Image (cartoon, rainbow, N blue to C red):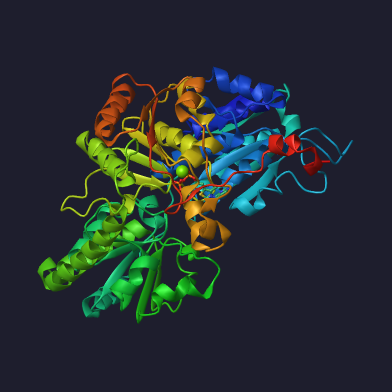
Amino acid sequence: MHMRSITANPSRIMVEQLAASGVKYVFNNSGSREAHFFDALHVHPDIHGILSLHEGSVTSMAGGYAQVECAPAVMVVHLGAGLAQCLGQFINVWTGSLPVVVITFAGDTGSYVDKIGLDLSHNVGPAAISAPFVKANWTVIEPEGLPHAIYRALLVAKTPPVGPVHLAVYDRLLGTQQVTTQIIEDPIPNLRAGYPADNDLEAVVRILHDARRPVLYVGDGVWKSGAEAQVTAFAEHFGLPVVCWWGEMRSVPMKHRLHCDRIEQAASTLNPDAIICIGVRHGGRGQPQDFSMFSSAQQIVAIGSDVGNLKNLPGLTAAILADERRTMERLEALALSQSSPKTFAERRSWALKQASTLRSQRKQVAQSIAPQTGRVRPWVLAEALDTALERIDGGLFMVEQFALPLDALGGADNPGKNVYIRAAGGSEGYGVGATLGVKLAAPSRPVVGLVGDGSLFYADSGLWSAVHHSIPVLYVIPNNQAYGIVATSFGRANGLMKQTGEYAGVVLDRIDPVKLAEGFGVEALHVQEESQVESAIARGLEIVEGEQRPFLLNVQLPLGLPEGGRAAKPFQLADALAKPAAVS
Ligand SMILES: Cc1ncc(C[n+]2csc(CCOP(=O)(O)OP(=O)(O)O)c2C)c(N)n1
Ligand SMILES: [Mg+2]
């Protein structure tokens, strides 16, 4: 162990330890009680505070940062109140099992008065409310222990099963008392699960030889272990259609010609007799159908770094508890020595045909929308953006929207270099901040935030952070003036809204994202015609990449209501006031 002695106040000790552990940014929202902490952060040359104007955005920035290469992200929010504010976005970090460490400070509600402003009730411990959203949480009392506590928090967060950690530090450690302790200078080790056993791998290869319609089900364990290239090569070698869970768009690039998109939609067409799951954390809706996609398979194999990759898969033939990338490296070596890709030529053409048919069906649905003046059809925008970013050698997309049919892209021989990263979970308000986190983690690559209008309005103050910290990203708002995905469900419910065609609570009219952006200091442009799309994207990229500043495109899509739908008139107080008898 390499240690360095330090005598300083506890705030400085924390900042020194974070910096010594390689942490570059502390995503934060500030508060008075943390004055000494922010003082220490401000003067340290190797670590920077990134300010968000709401704790939800602090969290989404940290989450986006962690989603790029699974590097730990650290955030500080203000007391119990800040912690409570960030939990709405923490559900995304939790769902995505991301290595985010949240640090809060807590007042002592036990010893003297039990009511301290902005702290949690004395009925619960300082780490109680984060418990459902984190992998581990604990409280720190001794200032000398701070280096160990921080080192451990980072280690626990990034070690499989990767996941968030909450560190609550008693606020008496925010004072000026000088403390002598040791900073841990060693880097946090990159621990991974081990190698698989040879006979387990041979069993997998045998299954793949014998099966007629095997399918590869990929999950986030693939990108987290850095196995994307190996898994893709494996699918190509054995001729396997690739399926995923909602949100997983990158472990095998979504545009790859073997990609069949979501398992629950593809399973009935593929009718798999064997399913090889790798790095999958299967989920569902809490219904018997959660497992129905596995019903045709006689052989189900799960490969993954921890029990989370095994436990939601019914009737496993084999389970391999091992690092995904290490497993793939071994499987690749075994496969190459035992079979040539020619062995699977017939199956490969079956797989390609299935993937291509499913993609054509999605494309057909996407392109069935009639053109409208003053509106850009979603698929036109999706294709233009994808092409523009491929043209500059690929970019990273942070996606929080449902209007653009990204699943209809691709299918060509070359899947391209764009990487699509879906919001870590479904808790709205992630995209604006996460886009900034992505850019901070991948500063040399172009980054696009594809953020729905609804999503934008949850977290629009994040636009200010882009300007304040000069983070050059291109925001593209596919603006259907609606909570489109919710409106679709309202229509499918076949209730009164569907019958009358009047949709309430889902139309977001008369909001101008360009004005909002400009209000926060981000230059922005309206795009209303399909003929303008290409040049607008080029202009946006020129500003973002050429001038290194953020830019926003508000792209006007057709209204996001089910066909023939219109906005219902909402309750308006002024109307009621005009009829005095109606209000008392
Ligand atoms: C915290 C939270 N509140 C509410 C919802 C329900 N919800 C799902 S999507 C959505 C709105 C999405 O709107 P937008 O970003 O414009 O997407 P699109 O129109 O492309 O569907 C809402 C409110 C949610 N997922 N999370
Ligand atoms: Mg919308």
Which image quarter is the C terminus in? top right
Answer with left or right where residue 399 lies relative to residue 237: right
Q: Position of residue 111 (x, y in %)?
A: 87, 39
Q: Quadrant of residue 449?
A: top left
Q: Position of residue 374 (x, y in %)?
A: 34, 35
Answer with left or right where residue 101 lies relative to residue 365: right
Q: Quadrant of residue 553?
A: top left
- Residue 105 seen by the camera: no
Residue 292 sits above or below residue 169 on the image: below
Q: Position of residue 57 (x, y in %)?
A: 55, 35
Residue 217 sits above or below residue 81 on the image: below
* Residue closer to the observer: 100 or 326: 100
Q: Quadrant of residue 497?
A: bottom right
In this view, the residue farthest toward the left is 342
Residue 171 sits above or below residue 515 on the image: below
- Residue 347 seen by the camera: yes
* Residue closer to the observer: 401 or 205: 401
Residue at the image position 49 percent from the left and 62 percent from the top: 492
Q: How many marks?
A: 0
Q: Position of residue 401 (x, y in %)?
A: 43, 45
Residue at the image position 36 percent from the left and 40 percent from the top: 397
Residue at the image position 64 percent from the left and 48 percent from the top: 137
* Residue closer to the observer: 202 or 471: 471
Residue 453 sits above or below residue 560 on the image: above
Residue at the image position 46 percent from the left and 50 percent from the top: 561
Answer with left or right where residue 413 lies relative to residue 474: left
* Residue closer to the observer: 156 or 416: 416
